[in-house]
Amino acid sequence: MKNKKHFYNIFWRWHFYAGIFIAPLLITLTISGIGYLFYTNVENQLYDNLFFGDSNKSESVSIDEAIENAENEYDGYSVTKVIVLKDDYNTRLTMTNTEGNQKYVFIDDHNQIVGSQNAASTYSNVMRGLHSSLFVGGTVVNYLVELAACWAIFLLISGVYMSFKGKVFKRQKGTKNKRQGHKKLHAITGTLIAIPMVVLIFTGLPWSALMGNFIYSAAQSHPSIGIPELQQVPPTSENNEIPWATRKNEPPASTDAHAQHNGMSNKTDNSNMISVQNLIQKVEEAEISKPYSIVYPISDDGVYTVSKGSNTGVTGLDVSPYEEMTTYFDQYSGKLISKVGYEEYGILGKWFTWGIPLHEGHLFGWPNKIINLIVCLAFLAVIFWGYKMWLDRKVKGQVSAPPKTPMGKGFTGFIIILVMLGIVMPLFGISLIVIAFIEFIIYLIKNKNRGIKEHNLIK
């Protein structure tokens, strides 16, 4: 019985400190996640005219003329992507300048310009920036966000353990105080959402800094469990419209003789390239239906990349995971060179092709959004009740942390659990090593101070 109590107290202390330190970040990530959950609905209202409106010109022009008009109107910008959307959405041109800034230009059914957006300030990109990198960006912040997600897993696991071991679910005799009430709400709600929340966190990890790259590398290195590899010139790496499973694939090069001309570091500007209008005809002949994105070649021996994705981050562009595909067309002849579809993915590729839209809330329509919303709101409530529990027992001027437990049999079991979690989540494991190092330094300092005091007493 004593060992069980010992084990419980270790979990309680770590659960407490983890909650205190990462709860503010988890609140930010959860709220921004809720905001991103409804980005398509918000953008359809905010950008109604751009998405569905018409220009004041009735004359029809070809899409290539529309691209030329856009490049003339927005000086310094050139079109790098053409996004042909479904239903009543206008076609979207992605334009980029030499500094890497992007602009979205919308053209109507007559291929006339309706208007434009600064890419960085769109609702979806703002919410995505806040959720993934807290607007700051950079490796350190990306690791911090991933670390918070990893520790959230620990909070959920330790919370469920304490809920059952602490007999929170049993009816208690006597009068309940406020702290007991908050504890019960905290425990019951946390236990109910533990599994859905773990699923949400793990389906978001493919975009993370450390674990995301590890997962993708594993998928690339082992095609039988991941994704097929195409060997040639890599496409631009920042293309959100290319499906996650093939985003870093290397497409084949165009084989036309014109490909021997001098290359360029960004979008190629070769006059011998097939027109976008003709390419769209080739796409239709290949029976690729809307919506899809066309990414320009980046060199004279590059290819057009035409893709359909289930997790594009573009309103009106997502498709079912089964429809995902990435195709490569020769930039000169328009010939379909190769195609990678969902059925060719391995288990990892397929899992995340389903998992990411599940995480984003559009895998199975409104029910997906509502379920994600309920889980997120419940998670915020769990954090709130956790803080209330702490404040109910907190002594003024003190942290009022759970009592420190000396090492014993329970501590060994706890370490084993932490090591297992550290193996599954490498960044979590690294953070544990850092904590252990800090604890060791503190231990040495305390021992040194104790030795000095004892020496002075002997004197």
Image (cartoon, rainbow, N blue to C red):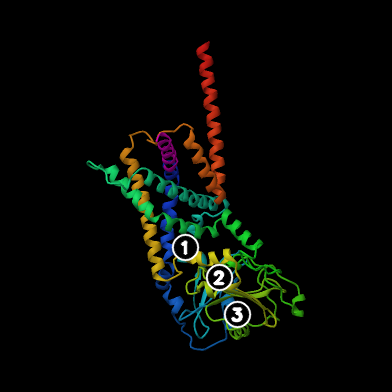
In this rendering, is residue 78 above or below 15?
below
Asked if the stretch drawn in magenta spans residue 73, the answer is no
Does residue 456 appear to the left or right of 23 in the view shown? right
* Front one among 250 and 101: 250
Q: Residues within 10 Å of mark 2 (few under 14, many from 20)?
A: many
Q: Secondary structure at mark 3?
A: helix
Gap in angstroms between the C-alphas marked 3 and 2: 22 Å
Gap in angstroms between the C-alphas marked 1 and 3: 38 Å
Q: Which residues are magenta?
A: 1-15
Residue 398: x %, y % from top left: 37, 33
Which amino acid, mark 1? His
Which amino acid, mark 3? Glu
Does residue 192 appear to the left or right of 278 in the view shown? left
Residue 361: x %, y % from top left: 44, 66
Does residue 300 appear to the left or right of 56 in the view shown? right
Task: Return the residue found at the far top.
Answer: 459
Residue 83 makes an appearance in the image = no
In this rendering, is residue 42 above or below 24?
below
Which amino acid, mark 2? Glu
Q: Secondary structure at mark 1?
A: helix
Residue that badge 3 annotates: 68
Of pointers 1 and 2, the one earlier in the residue sequence = 2
Residue 273 makes an appearance in the image = yes
Residue that badge 1 annotates: 359
* Number of the front mark, 3 or 2: 2
